[in-house]
Image (cartoon, rainbow, N blue to C red):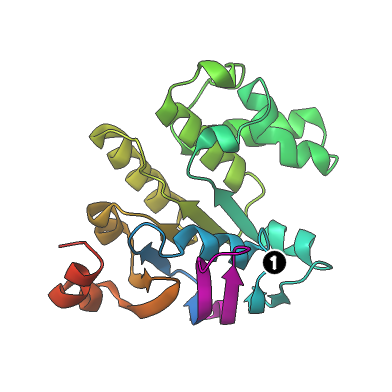
Amino acid sequence: MEKIIEVEGLSFFYPETERGIRDITFDVYEGDVIGIMGPNGSGKTTLLFSMCGLLKARGKVIIDGIPLSTRNFNGIREKIGFVFQDPDDQLFMPVVFQDVGFTLFQKGFPEDFVLKRVREVLGMVGLQGFEERETHKLSYGEKKKVCIASAIIHEPKILIFDEPTAWLDPKGRRELLEIIKGIKKTTIIAGHDLEFIEKISTKIMVLESGRMIAFSHKEKILTDSSLLKRIGFE
């Protein structure tokens, strides 16, 4: 398997606090689905943001052969589709078509091409016919799906989800599981939903107080009762 993400000595601390991440090193291979677990404040979101360049962390990150730097930020962004925990932090256009197609419009693609591609990705997330819906009138689960469509429309190699099942009901979690499985990309998911991470991940990373304390195949992590108890996932 080809290595697609390299992270070495990644550290970030929020000003005047001890919160953040410290000296995290790991590799992700093409096709991996990585679940990141840990209690509140363990650094899950900070790690995701630091890997993508949304926070200026110390250390080395290489995404599909491109070193993360200010100069390379646009190139890194092309490789990654990021889905935020709260869809209202991500949606910013009044109509679904405009929001999902925004990236392609920015690249100068013609409207007929963008419309075709928007319809394709909306179909992938179960929102056929939603092109002209107003985003602020969508249900929470529908907003999540629109965010996923926006994240995959430019065909990134890597998908990153921050707490994707937060505030979703059981039906919404099942639908999300099938959507992510159907997309079939290298995926990183940070969250508290142990059942969801167990069903979707191939490997699991465990964070505690900003440090990576375990990273292995999911079977090894999920059978380590003392580790799960230590981080509150009994």
Compared with 193, 224 (above or below) is below
Residue at numbered disc 1: 56
User: Magenta residues?
Assistant: 1-23
Residue 94 is left or right of residue 232, and the answer is: right
Decide if residue 203 is on the left or right side of residue 77.
left
User: What secondary structure is the stretch in magenta mostly built from?
Assistant: strand
**Residue in the picture at 42% in, 58% down:** 189
Whole-percent x and y of residue 31? 46, 69
Q: Classify 10 Å Cα crowding around label 1: few (below 14), some (14-19), many (20 and above).
A: some
Which corner quadrant of the image does residue 33 belong to?
A: bottom left
User: How far from the left and from the top, in percent, is residue 203?
Assistant: 34, 72
Q: Residue at x 58, y 47 (%)?
A: 152
Q: Is residue 44 above or below residue 221?
A: above
Placement of the C terminus among the 4 image quadrants: bottom left
Relative height, residue 62 to residue 94 (above, below): below
- Residue 96 is one of the magenta-drawn residues: no
Work out whether residue 111 can be spotted: yes
Residue 150 rendering spot, x and y as whole percentages = 61, 40
Residue in the foreground of this view, choosing between 43 and 51: 43
* Residue depicted at x 59% and y 16%: 134
The front one of 222 and 233 is 233
Residue extending farthest to the front is 16
Quadrant in the picture for residue 63: bottom right
Name which residue lies at 58% across and 76% down. Answer: 11
Q: Nearer the viewer, residue 23 or 67?
A: 23
How many numbered discs? 1
Question: What residue type is disc 1 on?
Answer: Lys
> Dot 1: what SS?
loop
Q: Which one is in front, 207 or 160?
A: 207
Image coordinates for residue 83, horizontal then vertical, percent: 53, 47
One can see residue 123 in this view: no
